[in-house]
Image (cartoon, grey):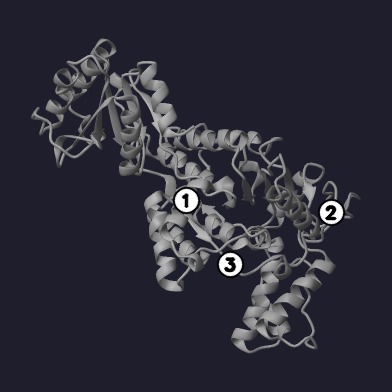
Amino acid sequence: MTLTQRMRELVDACFTGIWIESQEHEDAISELGRLCGEEDWQLALWDVNRGLHSFSGGDHSTEAADPLSAVESLRTLGQGDGTTLLVLKNYHRFLQSPEIVQAVYRAVVDGKTARTFVVILSPSVQLPPELETLFVTVEHPRPCREQLAEIARGIATEGNELPDGPEFEAVIDAAAGLTRLEAENAFSLSLIRHQCLRPPAIWEIKTQTLKHSGLLSLYRGDSDFSSLGGLSALKAFTRRALLRSRTGGSVHARGVMLLSPPGCGKSEFCKCLGKEVSRPVLMLDVGSLMGSLVGQSEERTRQALATVDAMAPCVLMIDEVEKAFAGASGGGSNDSGVSSRMMGTVLTWLNDHESDVFVVCTANDVQKLPPELSRAERFDGVFFLDLPSRQQKDEIWRLYRDRYGISDDEPCPKDDLWTGAEIKSCCRLATLLDTPLAQAADNVVPVAVTSAESVERLRNWADGRCLASDHAGIYRSAPTTSNRRRRVSTQPSTN
């Protein structure tokens, strides 16, 4: 539902306190102005710079330079028989004053009989307790694909500047999630740089926008599944699910949870997945969502998830999720429940979101994961990435030999307990130190040795509970030789 439709309903139903959450004030005011023109309503605006003025640009006869007199001016503006809307821009900055809160309270209550409406336009919702029950919140959505296409056609007026077909769809994909002003700037930059609309310049603007927000980061690499050894079942599952979503399936893929010991390729898989299915990869760092003020962390979490929804279709990566919400399983005793509330917000979004966002969560320590995170319908599957098999290791060795220029004739060192990350480290060190692979291997200590107990515990937990990443079906753990303890004889000692 558009802002215009929502506002028409609320005014007709006489909701006299309306809070519009918007990052694009001028566009929101333009929509309100068109609505008021269609319905013959009076529209007055106030901001701290210009004071009280009309939508058409003229000044009102009523003086209202300060925020308190702006609210009190509704008594004069609403003396007629019609409907009056007073839009207060960035008014959340003044709601710490008891006098202003009381004036807003009285204006909203009196508006029921006078047909006057207090409309606060702000980028965030910060209602004091006295006003929480009086205001209804309306979100001003970012432009949809059709609106972005209209903006693009308005910027690229020449015929050769506007691509068609799949190229134009790629431009709109790159602009998805931008505000109207950001989209206009990105399209203009593309015209200056390439003399036509092309995705690279638009992706550059989007990357900068996400970086400035501090909520998400954008990854766009050149590696696909061909640069990742093994994981055949996981690759086939995600490729088929996402390609089905892209071709217009009625059911969207939700995502996967990846469990494994460190170094088995969880994060690398997620990065390669974006290139494989031609989707941007958004990386959510939960630590960056933490705020110092009460309620700020929860608000930033909601903002980040709303941004992810706006940038669909995409892949969302939450790396090491058990560390991200470490305080959630402990009842919030360490952080006053902030982690639990943030986890609750994410869980609700995972279950209810309808946007085409494929979520990939990775974890190393299953004991810290709350059971509700991995239940059905939050993810399409929970996969366990075990230590690579012999065939997978041969693929990984071949990939990194080619990457680091190591001859195929050089023998591989003993790698019984190695992960893919350790094979990469050996090849990199061999090139860095200019030594044979066997000598470089002396500098590599496998995680299956340094953390043998935790690796074995994780494999035992995944047995029968997770899907296998290298073959179809349920994962079954194989006997491991990583923990070669001396057997203790049950026969009595001769001593």
Q: Are marks 2 and 3 in contact (CB under 8 Å)?
A: no
Helix or strand or loop: what does disc 1 sit on? helix
Q: In the image shown, does 418 or 67 lie closer to the viewer? A: 67
Q: Where is residue 133 shown, x and y percent of the image?
A: 35, 18
121 lies left or right of 12? left
| Image quarter (top left, top right, bottom left or bottom right) of the C terminus | bottom right
Structural distance between the alpha carbons of marks 2 and 3: 52 Å
Give the residue type at disc 3: Gly
Q: Residue at x 60, y 86 (%)?
A: 433
Q: Which picture quadrant has residue 15?
A: top left
In the rendered image, is residue 457 in sight?
no
Q: Residue at x 10, y 34 (%)?
A: 65
Query: Which of disc 3 and disc 1 is earlier in sequence?
Result: 1
In the displayed structure, would residue 36 be above or below residue 202? Answer: above
Helix or strand or loop: what does disc 3 sit on? loop
Q: Which residue is mark 2?
A: 488
Residue 389: assigned label:
none
In the rendered image, is residue 242 in sight?
yes
Q: Which residue is mark 1?
A: 150
Q: In the image shown, does 217 or 123 lie closer to the viewer? A: 123
Q: Residue at x 26, y 13 (%)?
A: 109
Query: Which of disc 1 and disc 2 is earlier in sequence?
Result: 1
Give the residue type at disc 2: Val
78 lies left or right of 192? left
Q: Where is residue 230 shown, x and y percent of the image?
A: 78, 64
